[in-house]
Amino acid sequence: MQQNPLIVLKEMIIAIQAYFQAHRFIQKHKLWKWILIPGIIYTTLFIIGMYFFIHTSGNFIEWMSVKTGLGTWLNKINSSFLGFLFIMGSLLLWLILLLFYFSLFKYIFLIVGSPLFAYLSEKTEAIIEGKDFPFSFSQLLKDMKRGVAIAARNSLWQTVYTLSILLLSLVPLAGWLTPILAVLVECYYYGFSMLDYSMERHKRTPAESIFFIGSHKGLAVGNGLVFYMMHLVPVIGWILAPAYSVVAATLSMYPLKQSEK
C-alpha cells in the first residue's frame, strides 16, 4: 500500500527519536538486566557468525566467477574499465550476501528470543500505563508462537526480495543501487517484527498487523535503520541493539494505539 513520502519520513524520524526515549526509559526504570543478557548472547553469536561468513563469502564469489566464466573472459579481453566494473560488482555482491546472511541470522535470533522480546515489550507498556505486570506463562507461549510465525513469514518474503535484488546486483551500473534497496527491505522487515509485539498484545490478528504496519512503513524502516546503525559501534552497539529496538518500537507505537482508542 502506498504512503505519502512525507508521512513515511515523519514516521522514520519518530522511530529514530524513540531510541533516545528508550535509552532514558531503560535508565529510569532500571531495565538493564533485560538489555544485557540477550545482548551478550546476541553479540557472541554475531561474532561467531561473522567469522564464518568472512571466511566463506570470498570463496563463493570466486566460485561464481569460475562457473560463469566471467573471470576467464575478463582476463582474455584485458580491459581495465570492465575489470573495474567486475571489482565493483564483486564488492556489491559481497555486500548483498552480507545482508542476506545477516537477515537469516537475525531471524533465527528473533525466533529464539521471541519470549524475552515479547515480555520486554509488554513490561515497557505496563510501566508507561502504571499498571501491575503479572507474569502469565500461557500468554508467554502465545507471544512466542506469534513471534515465531511472524518471523518465519517475514523471513520468507524478505528472502524473495533479497534474491531478486541479488539478481539485479549482477546488472552493470543498475546493480550499484541494490545495496540501498537491500538495506531498506532489511530495515522494514526487522522493524516489522519489533512493532508486531505491540500489535499482538492488543489482540490484533497477523493480517491486521500486516495491514497496520504496512500503513506505517516509516516506523518499521526507522526502527530497523537505527538497529543496523548501532552495529557500527563494535561490541557495545551489538549488545544494546536488540533490546533497545524492542523498547523503542513499543514507545513509538504507544501513541498510535492510544489515538485509535
Image (tube, grey):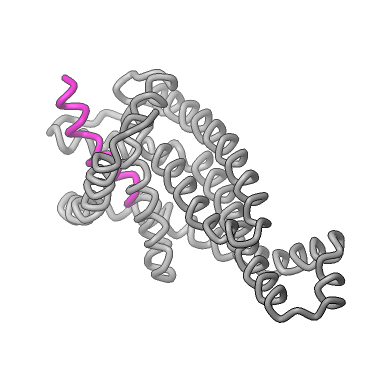
Q: Position of residue 185 (x, y in %)?
A: 48, 45
Above or below — where is 169 with respect to 251? below
Above or below — where is 115 with respect to 139? below
Rendered-image quadrant of the C terminus: top left
Res 254 → quadrant: top left
Name which residue lies at 53% across and 62% down.
44
Residue closest to the eye, 75 or 146: 75
Above or below — where is 224 with respect to 217? below
Q: Is residue 154 left or right of residue 122?
A: right
Q: Position of residue 246 (x, y in %)?
A: 34, 44
Res 216 → quadrant: top left
The mark total stands at 0
Q: Position of residue 250 (x, y in %)?
A: 27, 39
Q: Position of residue 52 (x, y in %)?
A: 67, 65
Name which residue lies at 37% across and 45% down.
221
Res 115 → quadrant: top left
Residue closest to the eye, 41 or 9: 9
**Residue sitting farthest toward the left:** 130
Rendered-image quadrant of the N terminus: top left
Magenta stretch?
Answer: 244-261
Q: Is residue 153 left or right of residue 79?
A: left
